[in-house]
Image: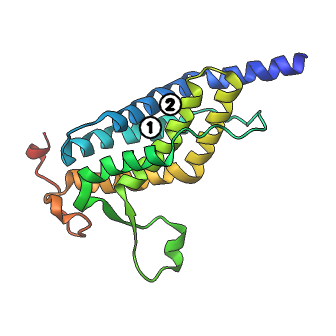
């Protein structure tokens, strides 16, 4: 009995830790932003994303380690329709600049040709993992919160964390290129300092 109580206390300590709660807060903001933006320009969207994505990465990297405690898999709440809706909203903003060259894929080693990636798909992949997590977390059942946190952090390490840094590189290039149509150019010159402010 004491062992179960100790384990429950340990799980609560992780789930309700300051670092876990701060990660949840940023994940909620990221998901809510992608769900609710309406008419927005590419530069406005890029500006917001280049601010929240580094914060999301930082907060995810500070979450304490935990292990899964339940045998069942955690609930998936992002359906294919929701995924496609978010992805198409993002694509409609980026249209011509949505595709970028990817250099951090394992397949790159074996490829003779460049591999492309999609800003809208990468952002939606991050959304999918974080939204699945926060939906379970917000229900307040400690063991389920713990397992959702565990799955989200494992996916961060192996999947969406890499997507985040990759797409951030593409968004950075878009934000600071002198010519928005020059996306992917090797010789991109940054804007004058005065224009950035």
Q: Is residue 140 left or right of residue 116?
A: right
Image spot of residue 93 (x, y percent): 24, 50
The answer to whether residue 12 is visible is yes
Locate the N terminus by quadrant: top right
Q: Looking at the image, which is closer to me, 191 or 160?
A: 160
Q: Is residue 189 left or right of residue 75?
A: left
The residue depicted at 66 percent of the width and 25 percent of the height is 14
Q: Secondary structure at mark 2?
A: helix
Tell me which numbered mark, 2 or 1, is placed earlier along the sequence.
Answer: 2
Q: Secondary structure at mark 1?
A: helix
Q: Looking at the image, which is closer to me, 59 or 142?
A: 142
Q: Residue furthest bottom?
A: 112
Q: Residues within 10 Å of mark 1 (few under 14, many from 20)?
A: many
The residue depicted at 33 percent of the width and 51 percent of the height is 88
Q: Residues within 10 Å of mark 2 (few under 14, many from 20)?
A: many
Q: Which residue is mark 2?
A: 23
Tell me: residue 152, above or below residue 162: above
Classify residue 133 by image quadrant: top right
The residue depicted at 39 percent of the width and 30 percent of the height is 29
Q: Looking at the image, which is closer to me, 123 or 163?
A: 123
Query: CB of mark 2 within 8 Å of CB of mark 1?
Result: yes
- Whole-angstrom CA distance, mark 2 to mark 1, is 7 Å
Image spot of residue 109 (x, y percent): 52, 76
Image spot of residue 122 (x, y percent): 42, 53
Tell me: residue 36, above or below residue 161: above
Q: Which residue is mark 1?
A: 56
Image spot of residue 107 (x, y percent): 53, 72
Locate the C terminus by quadrant: top left
The answer to whether residue 189 is visible is no
């Amino acid at each position: 009995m004491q062992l179960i109580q100790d384990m429950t206390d340990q799980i609560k300590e992780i789930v309700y830790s300051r670092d876990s709660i701060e990660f949840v807060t940023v994940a909620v903001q990221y998901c809510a932003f992608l769900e609710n933006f309406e008419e927005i320009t590419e530069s406005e969207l890029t500006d917001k994303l280049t601010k929240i994505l580094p914060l999301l990465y930082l907060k995810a990297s500070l979450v304490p380690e935990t292990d899964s405690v339940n045998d069942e898999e955690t609930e998936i709440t992002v359906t294919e329709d929701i995924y496609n809706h978010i992805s198409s909203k993002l694509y409609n903003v980026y249209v011509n600049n949505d595709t970028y060259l990817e250099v951090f894929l394992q397949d790159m080693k074996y490829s003779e040709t460049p591999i492309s990636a999609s800003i809208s798909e990468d952002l939606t992949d991050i959304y999918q993992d974080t939204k699945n997590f926060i939906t379970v977390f917000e229900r307040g059942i400690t063991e389920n919160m713990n397992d959702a946190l565990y799955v989200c952090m494992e996916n961060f390490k192996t999947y969406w964390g890499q997507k985040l840094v990759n797409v951030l590189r593409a968004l950075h290039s878009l934000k600071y290129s002198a010519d928005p149509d020059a996306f992917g150019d090797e010789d991109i010159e940054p804007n004058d300092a005065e224009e950035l402010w």
